[in-house]
Image (spheres, rainbow, N blue to C red):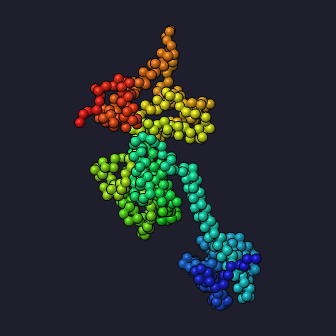
């Protein structure tokens, strides 16, 4: 059987404090002689004096006389109950006034009353039991607080692990056979094993978050956390708190200390998306982390060392932002140790079929569909679309198609959104004598016209067949054969010299 806590002489902060309250000096002296060997004893001759002592000292137990001039013992204990509810309260009484005792027990919540005269040994025993109850209460409060902190930490860790298991990122999740993507893969593979700071550039939706995670999980920090923050999603003060943490009372609503993402990512990687949206004050603080590896929480005067790899991303032209003095030049060069530019989807069209089938597999699993692929005409619409929203737009389009697919087993043009598939038209009346083969011929001519215009535009914009072939995502020889078949001659050939 477990033993009760030892409340005799010492607590973690020294002997426990007891406040004795009586208007008679002799009674106070007698009580003090009985208890002073084991505890820190404070005495007061009025309720007002007792409240002053409670305000400045840590008191575990109060023993108050019932009847005193001015503030009565019952009123005093009621005030103790209100302002110091953790303090144990005992009543010392020489009167058989049941009404006053009842009020003291009900409203003052006294632990026990001690009749006058008292037996010293019995009083010591009563005090010891009262302080055992106080210490048990303190332990319960401490354990409850520790349990709440542990539960919160466990929930955060479980959420983190669950998200990472569900969204495990690796190189095999990056899809692309185009020359532009092969260059990206080469740089990722070389930089992943280092701690170099990386700046990812490219339009919105090109997969910067995916690349950042691939770099993290392919490197030596993969056992550490990967945390991400969109720097354009929060006002500067909230962003500062989110990244660097804050101390309790640092601002309205800061009810407890909070660790920032830099501290949570210690030993791992932090991904700062939309870094170009930060304001000058935040840029200075980020520069300090990059230079010194130090952070300072809001409301704190102390700095803390952190070991974090930084990967930043932006869809802005940071060179232009620096020239316009909207972005610090020193921070730009600190971030741009290695720059990886992610090409827009329109410059890697040869990757569209593989991406589309990967997204279709995901959408099938998510929505319980049985779509086995795309019709030729649907894929041609995908290949011809401009994809202003890049890979993200493609993924959203396919997810939309799957959501509305019903029992269909093939994605056809009529299932695509109007923006991609074109407006829905009623079938044109078939003229007498027109054959099915004739209708197919019209479609082939339309496709050839689309290919011809895309090739002409690519050569006009790039100035050479080689670069045009690269932009279109096809080999140069294939481009030459296609041009010959389409009747595109030397009038649009690349310039000499």
Classify 317 as above or below 12. above
Residue farthest top in this picture: 432
Q: Is residue 490 visible?
A: yes
Q: Is residue 272 visible?
A: no
Classify 195 as above or below 466. below
Residue 240 or residue 448, whichever sits in front: 448
Q: Quadrant of the C terminus?
A: top left
Give the residue drawn at x 24%, y 33%: 496
x, y (%) of residue 306? 44, 65
Give the residue drawn at x 70%, y 85%: 124
Give the residue drawn at x 48%, y 19%: 440
x, y (%) of residue 424? 50, 24
Residue 349 or residue 330, whichever sits in front: 349
Horizontal side of 270 relative to 373 (left or right) equals left
x, y (%) of residue 464? 30, 35
Residue farthest left in this picture: 497
Q: Quadrant of residue 63?
A: bottom right
Give the residue drawn at x 36%, y 60%: 287
Residue 406 or residue 134, whichever sits in front: 406
Horizontal side of 47 relative to 296 (left or right) equals right
Q: Quadrant of the N terminus?
A: bottom right
Classify 205 as above or below 123. above
Q: Quadrant of residue 449?
A: top left
Classify 47 as above or below 282. below
x, y (%) of residue 225? 51, 58
Number of marks in picture: 0
Residue 268 or residue 66, whichever sits in front: 268
């Amino acid at each position: 059987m477990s033993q009760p806590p030892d409340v005799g002489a010492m607590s973690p902060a020294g002997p426990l404090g007891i406040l004795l309250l009586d208007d008679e000096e002799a009674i106070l002296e007698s009580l003090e002689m009985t208890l002073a060997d084991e505890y820190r004893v404070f005495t007061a001759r009025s309720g007002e004096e007792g409240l002053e002592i409670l305000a400045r000292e840590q008191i575990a137990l109060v023993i108050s006389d019932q009847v005193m001039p001015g503030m009565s013992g019952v009123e005093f204990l009621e005030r103790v109950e209100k302002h110091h509810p953790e303090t144990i309260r005992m009543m010392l009484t020489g009167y058989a006034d049941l009404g006053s005792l009842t009020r003291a027990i009900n409203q003052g919540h006294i632990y026990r009353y001690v009749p006058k005269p008292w037996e010293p040994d019995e009083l010591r025993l009563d005090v010891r039991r009262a302080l055992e109850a106080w210490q048990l209460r303190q332990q319960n409060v401490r354990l409850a607080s520790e349990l709440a902190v542990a539960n919160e930490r466990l929930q955060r860790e479980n959420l983190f692990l669950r998200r990472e298991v569900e969204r495990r990122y690796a190189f095999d999740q990056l899809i692309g056979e185009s020359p532009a993507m092969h260059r990206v893969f080469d740089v990722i593979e070389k930089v992943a094993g280092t701690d170099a700071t990386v700046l990812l550039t490219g339009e919105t939706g090109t997969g910067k978050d995916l690349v950042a995670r691939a770099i993290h999980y392919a490197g030596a920090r993969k056992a550490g956390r990967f945390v991400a923050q969109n720097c354009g999603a929060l006002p500067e003060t909230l962003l500062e708190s989110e990244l660097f943490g804050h101390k309790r009372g640092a601002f309205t609503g800061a009810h407890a200390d909070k660790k920032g993402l830099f501290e949570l990512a210690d030993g791992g990687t932090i991904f700062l998306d939309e870094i170009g949206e930060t304001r000058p004050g935040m840029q200075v603080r980020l520069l300090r982390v990059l230079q010194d590896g130090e952070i300072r929480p809001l409301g704190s005067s102390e700095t803390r060392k952190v070991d974090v790899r930084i990967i930043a991303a932006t869809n802005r032209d940071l060179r232009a932002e620096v020239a316009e003095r909207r972005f610090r030049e020193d921070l730009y060069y600190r971030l741009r140790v290695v720059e990886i530019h992610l090409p827009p989807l329109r410059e890697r069209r040869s990757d569209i079929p593989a991406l589309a089938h990967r997204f279709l597999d995901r959408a099938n699993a998510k929505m319980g569909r049985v779509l086995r692929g795309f019709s030729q005409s649907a894929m041609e619409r995908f290949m011809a679309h401009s994809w202003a929203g890049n890979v993200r737009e493609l993924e959203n389009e396919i997810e939309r198609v799957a959501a509305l697919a019903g029992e269909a087993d093939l994605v056809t043009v009529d299932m695509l959104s109007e923006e991609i598939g074109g407006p829905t038209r009623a079938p044109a009346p078939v003229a007498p004598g027109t054959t099915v083969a004739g209708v197919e011929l019209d479609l082939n001519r339309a496709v050839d016209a689309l290919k011809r215009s895309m090739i002409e535009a690519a050569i006009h914009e790039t100035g050479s067949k080689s670069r045009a072939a690269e932009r279109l995502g096809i080999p140069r020889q294939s481009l030459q054969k296609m041009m010959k078949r389409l009747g595109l001659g030397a009038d649009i050939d690349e310039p000499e010299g």
